[in-house]
Image (spheres, rainbow, N blue to C red):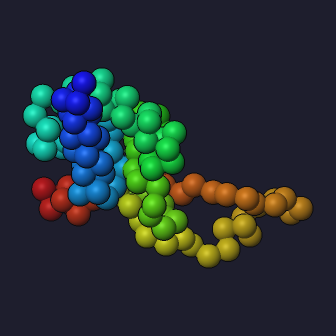
Amino acid sequence: MALQLERATQQRAAILAAFREHPHPLLPADVHALASVHCPGLGIATVYRTIKVLLAEAVLETVNLPGESARYELKDRPHHHHFQCRACGRVFDVPGCPPSLAAYAPPGFAVDGHELTLYGRCAECLRG
């Protein structure tokens, strides 16, 4: 039993390392590829189970982009938005927030949250 618990700890540590080392929203397949470097033999089902647990523990949060599968990122980051490259599909963090977004709400409405995603081509795709 101790070996199984140790393995679970190594797997979770590898998955958390993937999120810490790559500070942008990741798909489960990305997490699997990155974490497998630290924990060979890691299964994709374990990645999905661990993501579910980390969501329940409020360690991760879901990043939803229209027409895309859910991505995940660490929840401890300051408020930010995202940029999605239309060429390669990768998603990057955009620090900060434009001021006065509440001004775009219809008169008499109260804004209590927002999501903002920028689209274009990343620097790597522009060079290529």
Percent x, y of residue 68: 42, 35
Q: Which residue is situated farthest in the front direction here? A: 2
Q: How many marks?
A: 0
Dividing the image into 4 quarters, which one contains the N terminus? top left
Q: Would you say residue 85 is visible in this rendering?
A: no
Q: Position of residue 18 (x, y in %)?
A: 24, 49
Residue 77: tell me if it is visible.
yes
Decide: is 43 above or below 98. Answer: above
Name the one closer to the observer, 101 or 41.
41
Residue drawn 39% across the image and 37% down it: 51
User: In the rendering, at what x and y percent does residue 6 appear?
Assistant: 22, 36
**In the depicted structure, whether residue 99 falls above or below residue 126:** below
Q: Residue at x 18, y 29 (%)?
A: 3
Picture residue at 24% right of the left edge, 51% below the top: 17
Q: Residue at x 12, y 28 (%)?
A: 41
Image quadrant assignment for residue 114: bottom right
Q: Is residue 20 above or below residue 8?
A: below
Q: Residue 94's image quarter? A: bottom left
Most extreme residue toward the right is 108
Please give left or right for residue 113 compared with residue 77 in the image.
right
Q: On the picture, is 4 further left or further right than 93?
A: left
- Which quarter shows the C terminus? bottom left
Query: Horizontal placement of 94 versus 3: left or right?
Result: right
In this view, the residue in front, 81 or 127, is 81
Q: Nearer the viewer, residue 83 or 49?
A: 49
